Image (spheres, grey):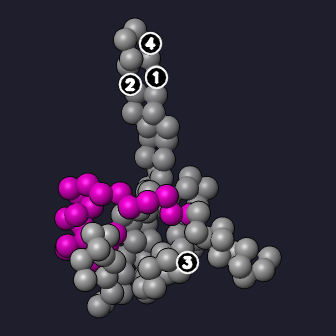
Amino acid sequence: MSVNLANEKLMTVLVGPHLSEKSSRVAERAKQFVFKVRRDADKAQVKRAVELMFDVKVTAVQVVNVAGKAKRLGRSLGRRQDWKKAYVTLAEGQDIDFHGNA
């Protein structure tokens, strides 16, 4: 596989940042950032994708499979899709800015 093709695949690993109260607290305390990732992504792929896209040094990655919630629409029952999130710990002095503040 060529380098460009490998980088193209890595660009699809991260679905987006997962912004919540918990992810904000974790980012302030432990320099961890939370991302929604593809369900077939592993830790190594997430690490390479974050380092490629944000030009930072990643020290650790933890992944969590999140079960979709059961939902009701009128009388019919449904279920949201399962998804995966990754907690990415950055090296000392590294930072990712999602809000665009310089």
Residue that extends furthest to the right in the rendered view of this protein: 1
* Residue at which label 3 appears: 48
Residue 1: % across, % down? 80, 76
> If you read the primary sequence from the N terminus, does the residue marked by circle 2 or circle 4 appear first?
2
**Is residue 76 covered in magenta?**
no
User: Can residue 42 be seen?
Assistant: no
> If you read the primary sequence from the N terminus, does the residue marked by circle 3 or circle 4 appear first?
3
In the rendered image, the vertical position of residue 91 relative to residue 83, given as above or below? below
Per the rendering, the mark at residue 78 is 1
Q: Look at the numbered disc 3 and give the secondary structure of its residue.
A: helix
* CA separation in Å, label 2 and label 4: 9 Å
Per the rendering, the mark at residue 71 is 2
* CA separation in Å, label 3 and label 4: 42 Å
Q: Are marks 1 and 4 in contact (CB under 8 Å)?
A: yes
Q: Are marks 3 and 4 in contact (CB under 8 Å)?
A: no
Q: Amino acid at mark 4?
A: Ser
* CA separation in Å, label 2 and label 1: 5 Å
Residue 64 versus residue 9: which sits nearer the camera?
A: 9
Q: Look at the numbered disc 4 and give the secondary structure of its residue.
A: strand
* CA separation in Å, label 1 and label 4: 7 Å
